[in-house]
Amino acid sequence: MTEPQSERDDEREQEPVVVRDRRKIDPETGELRAVDASEESREVPAAQQPQADASGSAAGEPEEAGPAASEVADLRKQLEERTADLQRVQAEYANYRRRVDRERDAMADSGKATVVGDLLPLLDDLERAEAHGDLTGAFKAVADKLVGVLEKAGLEPFAAEGDEFDPTVHEAVQHSTSPDVEGPTVTTVLRRGYRFGDRVLRAALVGVTDHEPAAASAPTAATAATGASGSAGDGPVDPPVNGELPLTDSDENQR
């Protein structure tokens, strides 16, 4: 005998309804939930598994593979562009820093050269005092210290006797010739020149001597007369007496 329909409906209503929240992310906190290994290993009956459609995606899986892949590609492209921009900006900054360093060094060297150039007349006075023997005692000690400080800063004197003449750093104010030199040579230094680093602060005033080939020696009148008398075979000629030449044997024979 079958149970009445009303009794079966009552039994269904009395069965407890269990709702399991299987979401991996907590909707309230947004954090990842701890997953129970027993629930993960529980197999879903084949009848309840989502069927794959013709495109290969599950029936219950959202079809977001295509848009996600394109979005990843766009993000990767943007990352490459930003990386290239950053590298370009870094290279430009490095070039700018090197250019600023060079300009700062050039300005510092220019300032030093200006100060040292104003002290060159003082160095000329010290050099003249030393040449005359007046640079002695404490005055010489101070002068040597000053010259040492300027040379340490980069000042370098040039031009000495025997140097080859260079029109770029030498200013010739005297000129002579001599067979003792092979080319234009500095033989006199009237004012010493100075350079600061690669910059010539002042050219040197020098006297230059050029090469001149030695001239052939010409025979003298006495040598010519001796040669003429020797060719005649008369022997040496006696000196004149009272303004008159003595008679020779040939003159006596003619008489």
Image: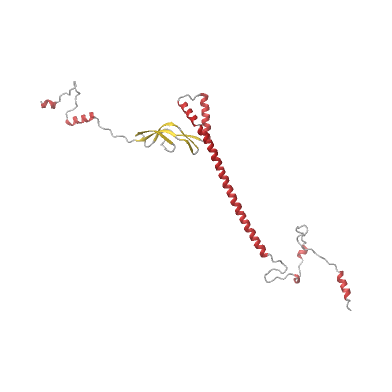
Q: Nearer the viewer, residue 35 or 56?
A: 56
Report the quarter where the C terminus lies: top left
Residue 30 location (% of width, % of height):
76, 58
Q: Is the residue 233 above or below the residue 5 in the image?
A: above
Residue reaching furthest to the bottom: 1
Q: Quadrant of residue 212?
A: top left
Horizontal side of residue 78 vs 22, given as left or right: left
Horizontal side of residue 12 vs 96, given as left or right: right
Residue 196 location (% of width, % of height):
50, 36
Colour mode?
secondary structure
| Residue at x 55%, y 45% (from the top left corner) | 99
Residue 231 location (% of width, % of height):
18, 31
Report the quarter where the N terminus lies: bottom right
Q: Nearer the viewer, residue 1 or 123?
A: 123
Q: How many circles with numbers are drawn on the protein? A: 0
| Residue at x 58%, y 49% (from the top left corner) | 92
Residue reaching furthest to the left: 255
Q: Quadrant of residue 18?
A: bottom right
Q: Nearer the viewer, residue 42 or 255?
A: 255
Residue 8 location (% of width, % of height):
87, 74
Q: Nearer the viewer, residue 50 or 198?
A: 198
Horizontal side of residue 71 vs 16, given as left or right: left
Horizontal side of residue 52 vs 242, given as left or right: right
Q: Is the residue 176 above or below the residue 10 in the image?
A: above
